[in-house]
Amino acid sequence: MGWDVFMDLFHSTVYFLLCETLVVFIGTSSAFIKVPLSVIHGIKGEPLVLLVEYTFPTEGQNIQGNWQLRRANNTMHLVTFRDNLPIHDMAMESINKFSLHPPNASLLINKLEDSDDGEYTIQVNVKYKDLVKSQNKTIRVTVNVPVSKPAVHMEPASAAVEDVDNVTMTCSVEFGTRVAYQWLLGGSPIPANPRYTFSEDHRKLVISLAKKGDIGKYICVASNLVSKMWSEPTQLNVFYGPYHVKVNSDIELKVRQVFTVNAGETILFHCSADSNPPNSYVWIHKVNNMTKEIMTGPHFVVNSGEITLTNEYMCCAYNNVTKKQDETQFTVIVANLGNGKEKLAQKAGFVSPLAVITTLSIITIVFMLFVFLWQRCHPKKVIKQMYTRPLMEQKRPHLSGHEDATDDFGIYEFIAIPGTSEPTRVSNRSLSNLDSVHGPNSHTTIYEVIRHVPEASSTAPVK
């Protein structure tokens, strides 16, 4: 019995604390109800829930409220509830259509109709003791019909003539509400162009004076708040040209519009131009400032043995739909090239080998000059040349003929020149063996030759 009393006392205490907390919360809070979405886009024929959330504990609380629908011209009462339980008015038509969605005061619309488009307002009143708090929240609901696949109607239906016809494309859908339209060309939005004009809702596209660049596949994209659909590509064809008329041949000797042929040869010329539809071609021979039509069609055959040495021709391209034409002129020169034809045709090819030969020659000359300078100025050879003759002879002018032997009389010794090595006396050794004594990587010491001349009293011959 004591345990039951304790639990009742505990529950009462908790309930009291919750109620006091609710009083403080309602008295100080600016919002005790909230709606996750203030705008909801519904689909016609499908159910829709308008969510409402309480921000305070609702168990055991005295809560009352109602839902209303406000349209452009009237306001309609939908549901009245108390403690999350609906109170239906049997006279209301909305009993079966609108209901509360547990566990709170959220509203369920069983099946959306066009008439359900509008603003839904919930009013909630919370009372505790003598304190009453009331708040309103509004949700905007749109009722939408998904768009159907759009269709494009184009005028003219076949093809437009460049610089003559305007093209009009109109996009339409069978179903859909609040439809927005967009045009694509080649899968990308149509770029800004002063010749492109759109209607206010973008359903219609007008292309003024169609051009070759307008050719392509156009797609209309229809969308609304709940769906998006693409039309089938509509191909726009434009008749244009001719542009860029040119003449080609299978002969190799061509400089710009001058063809050089060997006497007796037969040459095939081909005329082409950018045009839609394909052009008709006429070949004209110009002689003495007079023109003569000689052939029709894109191909022209010339027998060089039947024409003069220099001949001027013209290819004329004509578009039967656009009524435009263009032309180009070329010259045929007949020459007795013989075997020189191949040489002339390959003349440009000799430039490259000549350049290679010249480059190799320059490299060879530079290399030979480098080797010559290396041999002349190599340090080992210079040292060797220095010691193949006496030092005093290097310092005095050269005498022609045979000098007196008495001039060479004396005693010679070699003294190392002070430097990186210590002075060392060496015996009188032939320097001609310098290369054999010192290897290529051995250290080389430079010596000075000193001559000692005996006094006059001792210069008598020795017996």
Image (cartoon, rainbow, N blue to C red):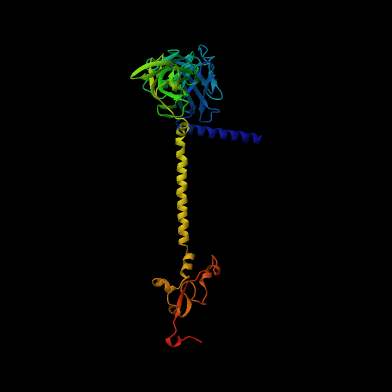
Q: Residue furthest front?
A: 401
Residue 289 left/right relative to 140:
left
Q: Which of 17/115 is in front? A: 115
Q: Which of 367/326 is in front? A: 367
Q: Which of 95/3 is in front? A: 95
**Which quarter of the figure has residue 277?**
top left
Above-or-below relation of 79 to 27: above
Q: Position of residue 289 (x, y in %)?
A: 33, 19
Q: Which of 352/398 is in front? A: 398
Q: Residue furthest left?
A: 289
- Residue 452 in sight: yes
Above-or-below relation of 368 to 212: below
Q: Residue at x 45, y 58 (%)?
A: 373
Q: Residue furthest bottom?
A: 457
Q: Residue at x 50, y 32 (%)?
A: 22
Quarter of the image containing the N terminus? top right
The number of callouts visible is 0
Q: Position of residue 209 (x, y in %)?
A: 37, 17
Q: Position of residue 397 (x, y in %)?
A: 38, 71
Above-or-below relation of 32 to 396: above
**Which quarter of the figure has residue 309?**
top left
Q: Position of residue 138 (x, y in %)?
A: 45, 23
- Residue 199 in sight: no
